[in-house]
Every structure is written in structure tokens, then in C-alpha cells.
Image: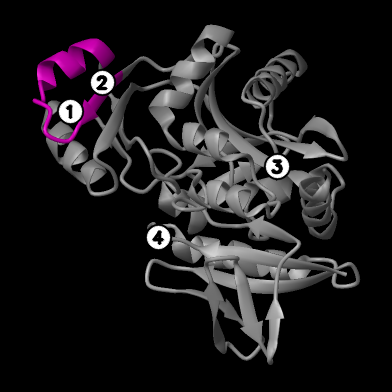
Amino acid sequence: MKNVAIIMGGYSSEYQISLKSGNVVYNFLDKSSYKAYRIHIFKEKWVMVDENENEFPVNRHDFSVNYAGVKVTFDVVFNAIHGTPGEDGLMQAYFELLGIPQTSCDYYQAALTFNKRDLLSVLKPYGIKTATSFYLDKGDEINEDEIIKTLGLPLFVKPNKSGSSFGISKVKSKEELLPAIENAYKEDSEIIIESFLDGTEVSVGVINYKGATTVLPITEIVSENDFFDYEAKYLGKSQEITPARLSDDVRVKVEAVAKKAYEVLKMKGFSRSEFIIVNGEPYMLEMNTIPGLTTESILPQQAKEAGISLTELFSNAIELALKP
């Protein structure tokens, strides 16, 4: 029986969602094949948490835990950390150095996809369309007129490296621009400002399933709020329709672009990309490599629609990670 460390938590605003995702993986993992351990990764402590919520420190030299008088080591790591250090390449590089397989993509792909600006720049030469954008770094002079002239209104201000829509604002007037930039700087020192794409928002899960790149049924996002923000994502303020209400040719086009992005980047494990479809053309917003795995999350909904249970989804990820 393989020992599986499910890492969850993290150092970002998303840690609570990550703890939820990690517990879902823990609860649905096939107990007949795997011995699962919950590992909480926080800035102040790395600990294994047992059934009674007792904590046992993790030895970071070899990622082991002394538990019940025995040194426990792990055959594989199931990565359920959204945001840093689980989704930006830090944990991936650490496990690669230790020679422990893990379920998400490699460190380079994690770092690249976590940086929205860099990701979109790398995919553009492959014909993948994106919104018109404007970049700012903390300390840069802010020329509001130039930004509005370049992108028009409304526009979106986003932290370059954050998830779960933390720090994102939709700006409809010049007066709203500076406060939106300040809000984004609370999450990251780099900002991406994008033109507003008026179209249908969809979320596309792509996974390696049993050795083949598989595009899961697409989800259409209909937000009650101005856009798919934190409330819409986690507090029920949106409708998520799976499969999305798309014509066959548009669906085929979106699937092809999502699959191409996954393969161009040499991705592994889970990915979930967001697109806006304008006049039948998909425009990519971002790619998440550790998407939410709670029972309400989009990727598990898509897997269910494809006839893949959570237990199968998680076992598949572990088996692929363990393959030499």
C-alpha cells in the first residue's frame, strides 16, 4: 500500500479553500490502495494532522514524519495547495530535489502558469488569442489616460500572481481605476490590466486521464455579480452550467485551444483554463494548475459529467505521478 501525503494550506489568501480541497481528496481517496496523510503547509509550520487533529512536525530535510514511534515517508505527494507555494513551482521543485513524485505539473510549468503575464506571452505565438493588456509594477508611474486610451472602458485590473479572484476589480470609470490598482497591489507587486471581453465565460478542465490528454465537459459561468469574483466562485453567486450551452463548432474550437495550451506547455496533472468566447472565438484569460477540488468545484463537476468519480479522478492522478 502506497503512502500518500496530501499537502494543503499554503501561504496565500486561498489557504482555506485549499484545506477544503485537501480534505475532499483525503475523504474520497481509495483507502484500499492508499494510506493517506494530511499535511498542512503553513509559513509558521509544516505538520501532519491525524484523525484527532493532533499535529506532528514534518522533517523538511527528507519530508518525513515521526508518527506513533515510526518514521513515515511518502511514496507520492498529492498537491492540493492553491496559490503559493503549491501552485507557483516552489513545492514542485522541492519534491523534485527530494525525488518524491507529485501529482501536479513540474516546477517550470507551475511558475509560468502562475504568472498570468508570462503565460499569455508564451501562448500567443501559438495562435491562442488573449485580451489587450497593459502591465504595471509597484512603483511605476500610473498614467490613467493612457491606460484607458489603450484598453477602453470597462476594463479589468488583476494581480499578476494570485487566484480565486482575490484583488480583481472591474473598472467602469476613470475614478475607479486608482482604487482598483491599489486593491490589486494588496495581493501582488505586479499587475495586469486587460480590456473587457464581452462574451460567454467558460472554464475548461484538461487532464491526463489514463495516459491521454482529455478535455472534460466545458462549464459555462453565468455570474450574478459583475464578473466571476470570489463571491461568485465560492458563495453561490453564480450559475455554473456543465456542459456549457455552446454550438458544436464553438465547443470543438474551445476544446482544441484548451488541449493545445496543455500540450504546448507540456502540462501534467490537472489544469483548468478560463476563456471568454467573443463572436465564436475563445480568448484565454488564465490557466490554473491546482484547481479547486471541493465537491462543488468546477473540475470535479466536469469529471462527474464525464462519468469519472472523485475516487477515480484522484487515483488516476496518483497513478500517473507514480509512473516512471
Q: Which residue is mark 3?
A: 269
Chain-order first, disc 1 or disc 2 = 2
Distance of label 3 from label 1 (alpha carbons): 40 Å
Could you say where residue 57 lies in the image, as x and y percent from the top left? 52, 80
Chain-order first, disc 2 or disc 4 = 4
Which labelled disc corresponds to residue 153? Answer: 2
Q: Which residue is mark 1?
A: 173
Near mark 1 (Cα within 10 A), the count class, few <14, some 14-19 or many ≥20, is few
Chain-order first, disc 3 or disc 1 = 1
The residue under the point 88% across, 70% down is: 1
The residue under the point 25% across, 20% down is: 153
Quadrant in which the C terminus appears: top right
Contact, mark 3 vs mark 1 (Cβ under 8 Å): no
Which corner quadrant of the image does residue 277 belong to? top right
Looking at the rendered image, the disc whose residue lies closer to the viewer, 2 or 3, is 3
The residue under the point 58% across, 46% down is: 239
Q: Is residue 67 above or below residue 253?
A: below
Q: Amino acid at mark 3?
A: Gly
Distance of label 4 from label 1 (alpha carbons): 33 Å
Contact, mark 2 vs mark 4 (Cβ under 8 Å): no
What is the secondary structure assignment of the residue under circle 1?
Answer: loop
In this view, the residue in front, 1 or 78, is 1
Q: Is residue 127 visible?
A: no
